[in-house]
Image (cartoon, rainbow, N blue to C red):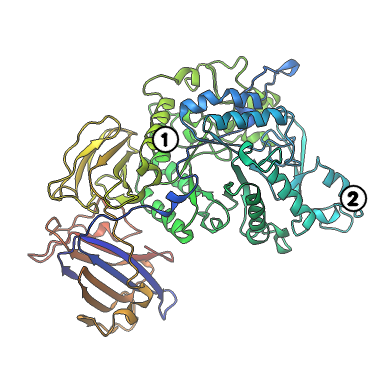
């Protein structure tokens, strides 16, 4: 169907319901086509998050920085609290504003999980006073501190387990998840850690008020360590390990659920510090984490991490478009809190190894990864060493030393011959002998700091860019289609007040050569005289953006690089519209008030892939279009072409457009009748049970 209209701004809302045949979803779509209007506020909900402006940095204490060269006869050097304090110069130089560290509580495991009571610190790292000094010194530099916390269980090296194991009369019997009456079996596990020590862990039964309150009290302590009612000397909050909406262990999830534990836990923390921030690692990494944002402030973008790594590895940016759509859809379901962008952490293959940047000639892929981390919509987290291009992937030695290659000591110096570099992995000869980091391999602060074009300086430049441009931290996100599959492009717009703010065009190249391509940014409202475009990294003026070229604005992006262009336009984001709910379109538009009504009853007998009804209703500011019908789930599609201006196509070329599964690219070559030159395409299909 083809409709010629003079309506240059548009927004789409849709809903759908199941048809009579379970495999054939009926579609009901409402399109609202609006005329151009004045600039409006463009502030996404996540801009209101208390961490919207933050750049996070994640390190493991044991592997981070050693202050006292405490090797002794063993030759080992552990990172420590004083080393953390000494690292603040570097963190401030890099530009990070918040740090998150693995657990600092007593644990026989090098990574700190399966820890004991969370109101004490691990003596490996120093004293409580030394930790609190680090917190104070970090705050003095404008750097917030977050600590990793395990709330669902406790170490065997604790009074709770040692008292209650094989002793049902223990006062802690009901606190722990024993599974037999003798207290000899339980929900938990044991394993061997990197230095040969045994690590044991048992689940709490958080249905028990004593266990629940103990964990809450431990968590409250670090928000106000001296208990004087002033949280200014405490940490900013927690990263929470392995969080569930409902814990799968029966019965009743042992009380470790979003409603029964996390909600009262967070409420209790707010009594100490009303501004406490908590963010979660969702236990199921394929989830987007929106289900946690009613209680916690943020969740990790684990699906984004996978998609971004794959895009760089395969040098194809196409999947980033639907991935960001899914991410934003998930956020919109929550409508509060924020997500945190993660490209690497201690549980996955090192970023540089995952994208094969350690292969000959591909080192600059790390720079494309840095751009994907720092220029997207949500607060970024840098995993320690990724800014240096450190490499590593899981080993196979039968202990939890398997993960050490992804957690090797941070490379402060070119040669690891003493402090400040840690050397904890010498206590496991297998991981040490198979280590990825080598002396003088170019992946150290000493070798990269101050070196123009180094990966470290690229991260530093991107962080400064994000901090200097509100649109990168707080701006709305709109995809921009591109004529090359190696380019991921989008606009970031931040307009806290009508007629003010910033519009940026971002383009990231995951290909190994410079690319000049056309980017469609026709969603921007451009003055009749055109808009100034300037590269924000060097201040150089670019080709003026006009209504004639905004559908294909030419940009050159360097190999494995990025461009960020500032555009002198007002926000192109249309006002929020609640005129018609797609699910209620028939009652809303039919039959009264509809100027055009086309009924097409099913005539093929199977009610499959047929238009049933088209409804049109003019408004003073545009036109409402309603469509009902049925789509099969095999990728066949509904395509609605609309002419709203003079810069459309008489012969369609969709070959370079990022598409839902099947259908869009196949429209290439479609010719329209003379006089019809559409410039908007609404494309709807279903595949694998998902509507696109």
Q: Position of residue 343 (x, y in %)?
A: 48, 40
Q: Is residue 625 left or right of residue 135?
A: left
- Using the image, determine if residue 223 lies above or below residue 257: above
Of helix, strand and loop, which one carries label 1? helix
Crowding at dot 1, Cα within 10 Å, few <14 / some 14-19 / many 20+, comes out as many
Q: Position of residue 463 (x, y in %)?
A: 42, 33
Disc number placed over residue 166 in the picture, else none: 2
Q: Nearer the viewer, residue 93 or 390?
A: 93
Placement of the C terminus among the 4 image quadrants: bottom left
Q: Are marks 2 and 1 in contact (CB under 8 Å)?
A: no
Q: Position of residue 427 (x, y in %)?
A: 70, 25
Q: Nearer the viewer, residue 389 or 474?
A: 474
Label 2, label 1: how many angstroms apart (C-alpha)?
A: 52 Å
Residue 400 seen anywhere in this rendered image of the structure = yes
Task: Name the residue carrying label 1.
Answer: 370
Placement of the N terminus among the 4 image quadrants: bottom left
Q: Quadrant of residue 264?
A: bottom right
Residue 204 seen anywhere in this rendered image of the structure = no
Q: Is residue 558 left or right of residue 422?
A: left
Q: Nearer the viewer, residue 689 or 63?
A: 63
């Amino acid at each position: 169907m083809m409709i010629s209209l003079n309506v240059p701004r548009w927004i789409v809302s849709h809903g759908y319901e199941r048809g009579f045949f379970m495999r054939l979803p009926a579609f009901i779509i409402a399109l609202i086509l609006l005329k151009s209007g004045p600039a409006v506020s463009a502030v996404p909900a996540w801009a209101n998050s208390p961490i919207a402006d933050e750049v996070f940095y994640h390190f493991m204490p044991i592997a981070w920085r050693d202050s006292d060269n405490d090797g002794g006869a063993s030759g080992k050097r552990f990172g420590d609290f004083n080393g953390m304090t000494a690292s603040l110069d570097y963190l401030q130089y890099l530009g990070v504003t918040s740090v998150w560290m693995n657990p600092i509580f007593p644990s026989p495991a090098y990574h700190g999980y399966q820890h004991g009571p969370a109101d004490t610190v691990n003596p490996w790292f120093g004293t409580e006073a030394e930790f609190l000094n680090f917190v104070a010194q970090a705050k003095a530099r404008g750097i917030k501190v977050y600590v990793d916390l395990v709330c669902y269980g406790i170490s065997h090296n604790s009074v709770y387990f040692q008292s209650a194991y094989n002793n049902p009369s223990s006062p802690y019997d009901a606190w722990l998840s024993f599974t037999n009456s003798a207290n000899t079996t339980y929900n938990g596990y044991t394993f061997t850690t990197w230095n040969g020590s045994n690590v044991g862990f048992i689940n709490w039964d958080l249905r028990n008020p004593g266990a629940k309150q103990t964990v809450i009290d431990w968590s409250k302590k670090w928000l106000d360590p001296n208990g004087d009612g002033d949280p200014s000397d405490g940490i900013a909050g927690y990263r929470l390990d392995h969080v569930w909406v409902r814990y799968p262990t029966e019965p009743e999830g042992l009380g470790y659920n979003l409603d029964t534990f996390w909600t009262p836990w967070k409420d209790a923390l707010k009594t100490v510090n009303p501004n406490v921030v908590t963010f979660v690692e969702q236990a199921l990494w394929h989830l987007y984490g929106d289900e946690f944002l009613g209680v916690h402030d943020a969740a990790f973008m684990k699906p984004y991490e996978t998609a971004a790594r794959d895009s760089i590895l395969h040098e194809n940016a196409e999947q980033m478009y639907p991935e960001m759509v899914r991410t934003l859809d998930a956020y919109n379901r929550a409508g509060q809190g924020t997500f945190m962008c993660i490209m690497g952490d201690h549980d996955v293959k090192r970023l540089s190894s995952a994208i094969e940047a350690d292969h000959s000639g591909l080192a600059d892929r790390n720079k494309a990864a840095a751009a994907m981390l720092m220029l997207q919509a949500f607060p970024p987290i840098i995993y320690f060493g990724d800014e240096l291009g450190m490499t590593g992937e899981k080993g196979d030695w039968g202990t939890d030393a398997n993960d050490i290659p992804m957690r090797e000591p941070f490379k402060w110096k070119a040669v690891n011959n003493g402090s400040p570099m840690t050397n904890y992995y010498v206590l496991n000869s297998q991981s040490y002998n198979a280590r990825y980091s080598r002396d003088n391999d170019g992946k150290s602060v000493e070798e990269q700091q101050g070196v123009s074009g180094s990966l470290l300086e690229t991260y530093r430049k991107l962080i400064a860019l994000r901090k200097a441009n509100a649109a990168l931290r707080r701006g709305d996100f709109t995809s921009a289609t591109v004529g090359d599959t190696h380019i991921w492009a989008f606009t970031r717009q931040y307009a806290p007040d009508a007629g003010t703010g910033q519009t940026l065009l971002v383009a990231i190249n995951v290909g190994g050569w410079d690319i000049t391509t056309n980017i469609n940014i026709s969603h921007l409202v451009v003055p009749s005289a055109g808009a100034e475009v300037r590269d924000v990294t060097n201040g150089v003026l670019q080709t003026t953006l006009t209504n004639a070229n905004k559908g294909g604005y030419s940009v050159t992006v360097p190999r494995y690089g990025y461009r960020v262009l500032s555009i002198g336009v007002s926000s192109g984001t249309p006002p929020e519209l609640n005129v018609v709910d797609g699910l209620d379109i028939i009652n809303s538009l039919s039959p009264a008030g509809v100027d055009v009504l086309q009924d097409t009853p099913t005539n093929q007998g199977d009610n499959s892939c047929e238009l049933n009804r088209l409804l049109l209703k003019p408004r003073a500011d545009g036109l409402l279009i309603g469509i009902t019908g049925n789509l099969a789930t095999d990728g066949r599609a509904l395509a609605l072409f609309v002419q709203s201006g003079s810069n459309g196509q008489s012969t369609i070329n969709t070959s370079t457009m990022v598409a839902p599964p099947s259908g869009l690219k196949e429209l290439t070559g479609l010719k329209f009748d003379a006089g019809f030159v559409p410039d908007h395409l609404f494309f709807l299909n279903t595949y694998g049970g998902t509507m696109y």
